[in-house]
Image (cartoon, coloured by chain):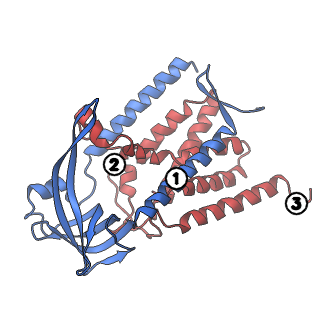
Amino acid sequence: MHPTHRLLGIAVLIALLLGLNVVVAAVDYRPYPDGETIRSDPVAADGEQVFVFREVETVSKTEPQAVVLREDELVVGIGLDGIRWDVAYREEVTVDLSDATVSGELNAGSYVQVYGQLRDESSVIDADRVVVDYQDAADYTYMYGTSIFGLLVAVAYFFSHWRINVRAGCFEPRGKQ
Amino acid sequence: MSEWLTHVFIAYAGFTICGWGVDWLTDRWIAIGVIGSILPDLSRIELLVPREIVEYLVGVEFTWAGIHTLIGVILLSAIGALCFGDSAARYRAFVLLLGGAISHLIVDLPQRYADGRMVLDSYLSPVPVPRPPTPGWYVTPDRWVVGVAFVAALVVFGIDRYRQQPLGQ
């Protein structure tokens, strides 16, 4: 295959992949209301079932409660001085854990999934179930550490059998066929 | 997602077992399948290029989650396959990259979700499908997961070496 044809093929496929990401972003495939719907009419959203992934801001020491943020950040500029972000919306939401099954240990900074119903003008989630995905910083370190190690293992294994032929612009087997 | 070391071990074990029945599926080709097992998580490019930046630049709603879908990994496998020289190698590379990517998606399925259902719908997005219940076996940082995957890979590695050169020969 001619390198130009290969590059052209790859470019077309990358364009299709980016297009797919736009289509997927436009699809609302879960039955739960999104942040925008809740913000626009928080009273009407009371009683709605929600399933959200959030970082925990604080965990109450006295009540079975945790606080997460409902927020929206936007990029408002990209320049030589870097990327400028703006908080378009930020509101604290209390997660009421009094009737919830919580799997894992909740800390400030934990990353959790909350399944429950909205109440009090959508300022509270009455949680049915909470799954703690990442309890603390050590969980993140573990995930990134093992993932990067896994990537290195896969790449080293691959290049022990294949090498790059720069002139043809492709991989070719190492050693005899 | 599970962490990538688990995906690599499971893909190695799976393709090595397949190799016992398929003559051409040697270590050289298994290595391509193992690379495939990482493809769906290239959606983690989000950490380097957040979707908000793409949205600012192109002005439409965007997500990298399209990569972690069946159509996404078919396209990525085709891109990977084009990086190989002859047409037979391209065909094999496509099948192996896609097989590795699908093994990744399957390993990710039984994770714990607060609403008790699998995220099968996100795999087939934008095609709507129902979400079956999840057994909720693990969340990503559970340390035992990579242990199980490592033992599986080690056992398969041992059997594979034995098949190539039985003890005492």
Q: Quadrant of the C terminus of chain B?
A: bottom right
In the image, the chain rendered in red is: B
Q: Given the current orientation, which residue lies at the most extreme front position?
A: A81
Three-letter residue code for mark 3 = Leu
Label 3 close to label 1 by CB (< 8 Å): no
Q: Chain of mark 2?
A: B
| CB under 8 Å between discs 2 and 1 | no
Residue at image mark 1: A147
Q: Chain of mark 1?
A: A
The crowd level at tag 1 (other Cα within 10 Å; few <14, some 14-19, many 20+) is many
Residue B62 found in image quarter: top left
Is label 3 or label 2 in front? 3
* SS at badge 3: loop
Image quadrant of residue A117? bottom left
Quick check: B50 above or below A77?
Answer: below
Distance of label 2 from label 1 (alpha carbons): 29 Å
Question: Marks 3 and 2, how far apart in space?
Answer: 51 Å
Q: Which chain is blue?
A: A
Q: Which dot, 2 or 1, sits closer to the camera?
A: 1
Labels 3 and 1 within one chain: no
Residue where numbered disc 3 is placed: B167
Does residue A113 sit above or below A176 in this rendering?
Answer: below
Q: Which residue is at the front of the view, A82 or B34?
A: A82
Which residue: 33% across, 43% down?
A: B50
Q: CA distance from mark 3 to mark 1?
A: 35 Å
Q: Is residue B68 left or right of residue B155?
A: left
For the question of whether residue B2 can be seen, the reply is no
Q: Which residue is mark 2?
A: B127
